[in-house]
Image: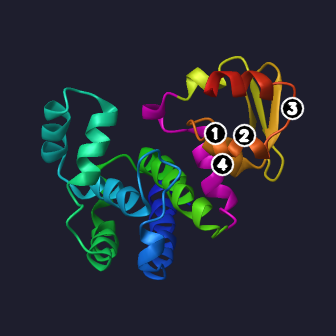
Amino acid sequence: MSYRGMLLDERAELVELLRGLSEQEWETPSLCVGWRVRDVVGHLLQDTLSPLSYAAVVVKSRGSVERTNNALAQSFSGLTTEQLVDKLDKESGRLSKYSPRLMLSDLVVHHQDIRRPLARLRTIPADRLTAVLDYPDPFALPGRFTKGLRFVATDIDWSSGDGPEVRGPGEAIALAVVGRTVALDDLTGGGLPELRRRMS
């Protein structure tokens, strides 16, 4: 399946999840520090902005990825939960103007940022998971965590890197290499102490 096809399927699954959440669950802290579930969804709506609008926020944030992400998430804070989901759903057809591969990596991780704290676990389809493992979000600077280590997924046929080994479910690896410390408890191997040190 194409990256665009996987992206659309991933977004459809997230929309289905969000439509079933209670108002209390929308206020639950996500895995993104300082962001509730509501804020993560607001962040994902940045993909609905035109490239020019996005660039304007980046300039106003003086090029800081963190400030840009926070500003974009806050820009949708006035919407109700129903409006957030409807906008996320409605805008799916406009995704072609951005890199589907990059957007898939971002979306899968943020989907898990929402699901894990809510204990709404799922099995990510192997093709999507492999795509994200092969191309972790570069804006998260994954190289600072992965350099000199070998990562091996135990539930799908995937491995990458050289050095002391870090093993575990592909989902946990995908989260760990972009800085989600909660995933470390699902991993094992001789390279895990070094990975923990880098993420501390």
Q: How far apart are marks 4 and 2 (CA)?
A: 19 Å
Decide whether the magenta segment is chiefly helix, strand or loop.
Answer: helix
Q: Give the range drawn in magenta.
A: 122-141
Residue behind mark 2: 184
Magenta stretch containing residue 134, yes or no? yes
Secondary structure beneath dot 2 equals helix
When the figure is inspected, residue 188 is found, relative to residue 48, above or below; the finding is above
Q: Mark 3 points at which residue?
A: 189
Q: In which quarter of the image is the C terminus?
A: top right
Q: Are marks 1 and 2 in contact (CB under 8 Å)?
A: yes
- Which x, y percent locates residue 159? 76, 36
Residue type, label 2: Leu
Which numbered disc flags the more N-terminal residue, 3 or 4?
4
Residue drawn where x is 63% and y is 70% of the image = 120
Q: Where is residue 141 in the image (x, y as percent from the top left)?
A: 49, 27
Q: Do the residues labelled 3 and 2 touch (CB within 8 Å)?
A: no
User: Tag 1, which secondary structure?
Assistant: helix
Residue found at x 31% / y 79%: 82
User: Label 1, label 2: how many angstroms apart (C-alpha)?
Assistant: 6 Å
Q: Quadrant of residue 190?
A: top right
Helix, strand or loop status at disc 4:
helix
4 or 1: tag closer to the N-terminus: 4
Q: Does the magenta stretch include residue 145?
A: no
> Marks 4 and 1, Cα distance to the nearest angstrom?
20 Å
State if disc 2 and disc 4 touch (CB < 8 Å): no
Q: Which of marks 3 and 1 is nearer the N terminus?
A: 1
Q: Quickly name the residue at label 1.
A: 181
Tell how many labels. Answer: 4
Q: Which amino acid does label 3 sit on?
A: Gly
User: Does 167 appear above or below 91?
Assistant: above
Q: Which mark is residue 130?
A: 4
Within 10 angstroms of label 2, few (less than 14), some, or many (20 or more) residues? Answer: many
